[in-house]
Structures are given as C-alpha cells and as structure tokens.
Image: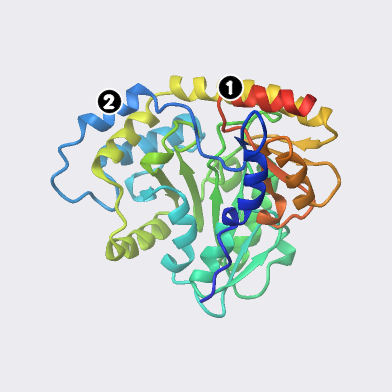
Amino acid sequence: MELPEFPWDTLAGAKAVAAAHPDGLIDLSVGSPVDPTPELLQTALREATDAHGYPTNWGTPEVRRAIVDWFARVRRVPGLTDENVLVTVGSKELVAGLPLQLGIGAGDAVVFPSVAYPTYDIGARIAGSTPVPADDPDDWPAGTRLVWVNSPSNPTGDVLGVDALRRVVHAARERGIVVASDECYALLPWEVAEAPSILDPRVTDGDLTGLLAVYSLSKQSNLAGYRAAFVAGDAQVVQRVLSVRKHLGLMAPSPVQHALAVALGDAQHVDEQRERYRGRRALLLPALESRGFAVSSDAGLYLWSTDGSDALAQVDRLARLGILVAPGTFYGDASHVRVALTASDDAIARAAARLRG
C-alpha cells in the first residue's frame, strides 16, 4: 500500500514566505480551534481522572445516553438507543478506518464527494479498495460498498438538504450500500436554516438501515485535543463496527468520555463559540471579496475562495501578505483555496486589514 504525501507537509515553502511578512504569519490553512476549551468541560475532565480501569470501546452508559438525547434534542433524530451509538477516538480515525472495519477490501469501491476532505480517499486505500470521487448516485460504480457524504462540506461549506439526502439514501438502499454522513460542522450554519442529518426522519422515513452519521465535538466545543467524537445509525452496522474496534483496542479515555457527555448536555458554550466564528466570518469574508476573491460559505469553518487563477498561485499570492491558506488541490479542486476561520479575533482582524490593503 502506497499513500500520498501528507498534504500539509507540502506547504513549507509558502509558510516560509508568509512567516517573512513584517507583521508575522497568520495561519489560516488548518481548522484547529484556537479558543479555550470551556471551563465546564475542563472541570468535567478533571472530575473523571481516577480512571484506573480500561475504558469501554462502546462508550460508558452515561455518554451513550447523552449521545441519544443530543440526537433527539439537537438533530431532530428521535428513537435511538444504546445499540445505535458508539464513541470514537475523534472522527478522523473513524473516517480513515471505517472501510476496513466494515470488511471492505479489494474489488470494492468507496465513493466520496469529488471535492472532499482527503481522508475519505485514504481510508479506501488503507482497506485495499478503490477510491471513487463522485457526486451523483448515477456515477457510483459497480462494487460500491460505502458512500461518504459530507454536509456541511469541508472544504466548500455546501449543505445537502433533505431532498438531496433522500436521493442518496434511496439509491444506496436499492443496491445494499452503506451511507456514512460526516456532519461535524452541522451546528455552524450561516447562509442556510439548517444542515439536516442523514438520520433525520424526513430523510429516512424512520428506517435507519444502512445509514451512519459521524460527529465530532472538536469544532463546536473546542475539544480537538480531547479526541471526542461518535457515530450513530443502523444498530446492526454500529455493532459490527464495534466488534472490530474491540479487537483493535480503539477506546476513548474514560475522562474524555465523561467530558463528552457533559459537553453534549450544554448548549450555551456551543452558542457562544458559534457567535465567535460568526464574527470572524463577518470580518474575513468581505475582506477577501475586496481583494477580488469569490467566496462560498454556506456553513462550517471555511471560506472556499477563488480569484480565478490556479490554486497554488493563490496560495503564493496570499503568502506574500503573510497569510497561509490551503490550496484546493488538497481536496480535488485546482481553482480554489480554503481559508479557515480558526484564528484569534486579533489574527482575523489583521488578516482582513492586510487583504483590504
């Protein structure tokens, strides 16, 4: 198995140019939160530090109940039980490992959006299956076993509505395909009223067969360092994945599981963080437009931007302003750059000022 170079390692040259700016580097190339983890969640972690025994792969009863309640209260998905949910060690390991954990391999295909987070492709390769970028169910090849959807999208911010999700689900069920929906940015809508879940009854008609939703608290709760995430959906699929994960020893630490449960029960810190990002977006988006960039950002943490030139040329152009961004080539698009909102208020304000020149 041969994997491509880790994309962000290729930004060293542009980063050096940006770092040479007289006012310093402003790094908007990654989506790592910069704001403090809420004190409520830090306290929860400390409360659970007497963790002498091995944690459970599945998730403690406390955290499983919190996930079930959160889906009903926040994502409009009632009726889940413990059998429908599973704690993961962050969402990236689940994305990378799901094809393998589902028994997908040589001769099988894994489909993901044509412009997408690169780990969908990597997960297919690790399993020995064929990665296939495709946006339309009519383009899914024979032998497709797993289809990834990502709404809101990283990097584009596009959101799939109920009708679009229903079409995916219907096409997958006709062929016995598992659909996994990466919904990690769902509580950061800007230009849309909502980003519905693949598990929403308006999508499923109450039938979860073959469907999984993946979620992370890294963004909404500033818990990236905790690796706190979960997957929910079809109980048979969830339990099949769990049985493999037990053999692999994939267990979120017990203190993290407690903090995850507390985080899911508190909406205030999520609302506060959303407003921080809303304010940063309100500064940065028009500043990019003033520099000649067209910007797409219906939801999520990124401004998907283009000035009409090659993506790498755009990276270089912004690096000369001391601003580092990610080229769209990381995601399958050579004409855009991804600009993250995950920088401090001060850094965003300085970036906006540089863009306005």
Amino acid on which disc 2 is placed: Thr
Mark 2 surroundings: few (<14), some (14-19) or many (≥20) residues within 10 A:
few
Amino acid on which disc 1 is placed: Asp
At mark 1, the secondary structure is helix
Nearer to the camera, 266 or 274 = 274
Nearer to the camera, 339 or 172 = 339
One can see residue 154 in this view: no
The image position of residue 214, as x and y in percent, is 48, 48
Nearer to the camera, 354 or 329 = 354
Nearer to the camera, 140 or 312 = 312
Q: Is residue 201 left or right of residue 48?
A: right
The residue positioned 39% from the left and 40% from the top of the image is 225
The image position of residue 349, as x and y in percent, is 65, 22
Disc 1 to disc 2, C-alpha distance:
25 Å
Q: Earlier in the sequence, mark 1 or mark 2?
A: 2
The image position of residue 284, as x and y in percent, is 70, 27
The quadrant in which residue 217 appears is: top left
For mark 2, what is the residue?
43
Residue 199 vs 119, above or below: the answer is: above
At mark 2, the secondary structure is helix
Residue 107 vs 219, above or below: the answer is: below
Q: Quadrant of the C terminus?
A: top right
Mark 1 surroundings: few (<14), some (14-19) or many (≥20) residues within 10 A:
some
Total number of numbered labels? 2
The residue positioned 57% from the left and 80% from the top of the image is 107
Q: Which mark is residue 101?
A: none
Q: Is residue 227 left or right of residue 26?
A: left
The quadrant in which residue 256 appears is: top left
Residue furthest to the bottom: 107
For mark 1, what is the residue?
345
